Every structure is written in structure tokens, then in C-alpha cells.
Image (tube, rainbow, N blue to C red):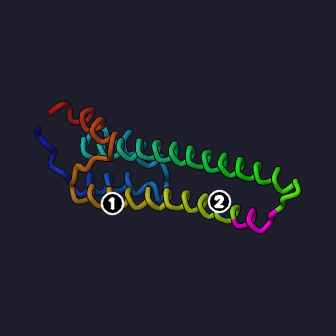
Amino acid sequence: MEKEELTSDARLMAMLSHLSILFGGIILPIILWATQKDKSKFVRYHALQAIFFHIAYVAILVIVIIALVIVALISGAGFGALSKGHHSNDGALSVLMIILIIVFYGGIFISIFGAMAYEIFLAIKSYHGSYIKVPVIGNIIYKKVYGNQ
């Protein structure tokens, strides 16, 4: 397989594709992909990875938020029914709700900062000219851009 000669501009655009998670969202890698797809396979490869990483990340984040809301509602609904009965234990319910809130927001923040950290890692690697692959989608995109070589 013959890899292209990487210019500093191509490495910079590949890096910006990944850093777009911090600013600009999915729009920047789409613009970079659209303007550079015929000029640089390296930029096309990293821009596509960034696009699909953004899509996967948002989908996973939405699923996590929905799951956590459902768990919170079920827990709150179940304990709300108990508190109406004779065995009201408001102290234990308050502690459980605080724990659920901490887990809820902790899960969201960990996923947000984890995705940002991973994209920063990918940005650094791409700026150094690496063809690092995002799990699952990286191999598929690599084959589409560079063929089965």
C-alpha cells in the first residue's frame, strides 16, 4: 500500500477533525471531509473517523441518559408509593435519591470527559501522522478510504 506524503496542512486538518468535539461539533469534520476528500486520503480517513465517532458518541450518550432517567423514575415511583404507606422512611429515600443523582451525573460527566480525552489522544496521534483506528469503525473506514490493501 502506498501512503501519501503527509503535509503539515493535512496533519493539522486531521487533528482539527478530532478536536472538533471540543469546538464546532460534527460540522467541522464534515466540512473538512467534503473539501479534502479528493485531495488527501489521510484527512478523509481522520475526518470520517471523527464524524462517525461523534455520531456513535451522541447515540451512546442519549441511550445512557434515557436508561438513567428510566432507572431514576422507576426508583422514585416505587419509593413514592412506599412513602404513602405506613412505613415512611424519608431519610433512607433521600439518601438513595442523592446516590442516584450522583450516579446519573457522574455517568454523564465520565462519558463526556472520556470521549473528549479520547478525541484529544486521536488528535495528537493524527498530527504525528499516525493512522490510528477508532474501535469498530476504524477498520471499516480504513478499508473504504485505502482499499483492502
Q: Secondary structure at mark 1?
A: helix
Q: Amino acid at mark 2?
A: Leu
Q: Quadrant of the C terminus?
A: top left
The spot of residue 88 in percent (x, y) is 84, 61
Residue at 77 percent across and 49 percent down: it is: 77
Magenta stretch, residue numbers: 89-95
The spot of residue 25 in percent (x, y) is 49, 51
Q: Quadrant of the N terminus?
A: top left
Q: CA distance from mark 1 to mark 2?
A: 31 Å
The residue nearer to you, when weighing 37 against 65, is 65
User: Does 99 sit left or right of 92 as displayed?
Assistant: left
Q: Which residue is mark 2?
A: 100
Instruction: Decide: few, some or many residues near mark 1? Use Cα within 10 Å; few <14, some 14-19, many ≥20.
Output: some
The residue nearer to you, when weighing 146 against 115, is 115
Q: Secondary structure at mark 2?
A: helix
Instruction: Decide: few, some or many residues near mark 2? Use Cα within 10 Å; few <14, some 14-19, many ≥20.
Output: some
Marks 2 and 1: in contact by CB < 8 Å? Answer: no
The residue nearer to you, when weighing 87 against 113, is 87
Residue at 68 percent across and 52 percent down: it is: 72
The spot of residue 103 in percent (x, y) is 59, 60
Q: Amino acid at mark 1?
A: Phe
Q: Residue 145: within the magenta?
A: no
Residue at 21 percent across and 55 percent down: it is: 129
